[in-house]
Image (tube, rainbow, N blue to C red):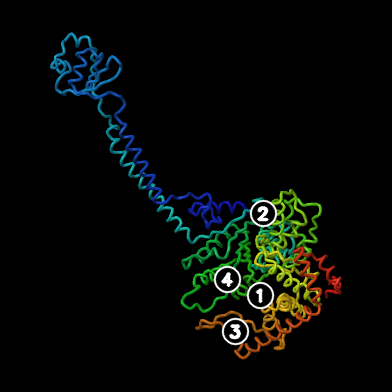
Amino acid sequence: MAKMKLQSLKLSRKNKGNGKSGDKNGGKGSDSPKVMSFSQQLMWAFVIFLFLVWGYSLVGQSSKATVIPLSQFSSFVKEGQIQTITVEGDTLTGTKSDSSLVKAKKESSASVLDTLSAYGISTSTLASTTITVETARGLSFWGSLIPIILPILFLAFMIWWLGRGIKGANMQALSFGQSRAKVINPDDAKEKILFKDVAGAKEAKEELLEIVEFLRAPKKFLDIGAQIPKGVLLMGAPGTGKTMLARAVAGEAGVPFFHLSGSEFEEMFVGVGASRVRDLFDMAKKAAPAIIFIDEIDAVGRARSANIGGQGEGREQTLNQILVEMDGFEPTQNLIVMAATNRPDVLDQALLRPGRFDRRVTLDLPDRGDREAILTVHTKNKPLGEDVNLSVIAERTPGFSGADLSSLMNEGAILAAREGRTSVAQYDLIRSIEKVMLGPERKSHVLSPKEKKLTAYHEAGHALVASCLPDADPVHKISIIARGRAGGYTLKLPLDERRLMSRATFLDDIAMSLGGYVAEKEIFGDITTGPSNDLQVATRMARDMVTKYGMSTLGPVALESDGQAMFGRGMYDKGYSEAFSEKIDSEVKRIMDEAWQRARTIIIDKRIALTAIAEELIRVENIERDEFEKLLILHGIQPKRKEEIV
């Protein structure tokens, strides 16, 4: 029944002239006719006109007779060159001995014999010449109408052709307020996605199974008086699979899936978004049971505020229309509205109240097990080498989203193909991790001996400080090969999955970030622009400790700004006074100074180890974890083990 409703819905939409609704090109589907521009139509009309003129010029030229004066024609007859004469009205057509034709005009009132006799042609000569008299052919009724009808038809054709462009523009104007949602039919095997195609997100799938069951068998819930939530909000970081999970719900339930982005509601005209919302919900209600999915709903669902000067009026009208449509659902309508956002904090509270998006499903970044499952999904069409161990790749990619892991596998396949191999090796995947995290290698960026030495000591400072601090993550790789925007990098990864960050971990990470800065100053007595990003990261981390997490002497208070504009003023309320702002700055400065001192103590005490690490970096440019730990043990530093990380 859902399929029949959906097909009838698509047919009615086509009859409205909207083309293929839901096409990615803004409603201009591949099946809609392409209207030529006015200049192109004018050019084609001119070409057709030339062909018509050329055709008219050929009318009446059925014979290739040469027109000559009557006197010359008489001379040919007198000399015996003309064998036959055909008389048609006042036209004389003669056939010469060489089969060529000549034509001449005589007076209409005189006969052919009188005309030729007047030119001195004897009767014997005329007797030897065959003379045929034919009745003059006049135009038929339709023949007389052709010169009148053809110009009229040509003008009518021109008006119709040029009017097509105007009609196409009018049709686009009429369809301006119609929805451009992409509709995925449940019987479309190429577009259909099931839960088994989405790795990880176990808790989210369990939460959404209730929605699937309601769409499959709503009577079981309605008979007992239960009401399934009308709206489901999928929240999570970018790339965690919110869109795929929404499509999987539709695939499991076997219902049509209406998909569009929040930004597709908005245009340059106020009111278009609200019109498209109404049209979208009308389409979905006719195809029910169905799912409406609005991706990036924060584009239209941001919290409403005082709009000074009318700014954002169109967006608010669109939001109001969504709220009204969700309130208008009947309890028996099998229609679910799903939305996705990575900014739930900016959504309007009216969207989140009970009866609208009151069911919220959070998608976290995948843990190690989920990452391995996601990597397995993305290896279906990729031939892997015998040395590939996805468990190791999953261990080295904490914090990666599903989209990051997909990009990682794709980059590994590209690296293998570029080097002429037919399978993806473990080394390809290891290199692709760094490429996804930091960018491609800049092999053309050749360092001078001085810069290479400075970069080696800088990265060695990061690695040494991280290895000596108890709560810092262990170092997995050090490199002085430029990659992305970084001249070198120190890759440190946690041994276990981490959901919470402690104050001690923050302090050790800040000190580790300052390790390169301190190493440059202690070894070379000067500072370069290299540590600029390290200082930004460390300062931001220290400020978050003070203003967000209450990890300072200022006590358990949250001081971050909520970013809400004050009414009537073009400024933002910080939420605290200028005097307290000075205290925040002083506390951030204190944390940075203490971290700098801790890093400096390690660099001075372990200078021999620092020099050994830097010299090895200058020699090989890359140091992996095993080689790095051997250097640490050689200089009396015990590497971190999994059981030591608490």
Image height of 86 relative to 198, above or below = above
Q: Which residue is mark 2?
A: 192
Q: Earlier in the sequence, mark 4 or mark 2?
A: 2
Q: Which residue is mark 4?
A: 301
Name the residue located 47 percent from the left edge and 66 percent from the top edge.
Answer: 268
Q: Compute the Cα span from label 3 to label 1.
A: 34 Å
Image x and y of residue 199, in percent: 74, 60
Q: Which residue is mark 3?
A: 574
Question: Is tag 3's residue or tag 1's residue first in the polypeptide sequence?
Answer: 1
Q: Is residue 383 above or below residue 492?
A: above
Q: Are marks 4 and 1 in contact (CB under 8 Å)?
A: no
Circle on res. 528? 1
Q: CA distance from mark 4 to mark 1?
A: 45 Å
Tell me: 563 left or right of 208: left
Indicate the secondary structure of the residue bearing disc 2: loop
Q: What is the three-letter code of the residue carrying label 1?
A: Thr
How far is the residue under mark 4 from the one under mark 2?
28 Å
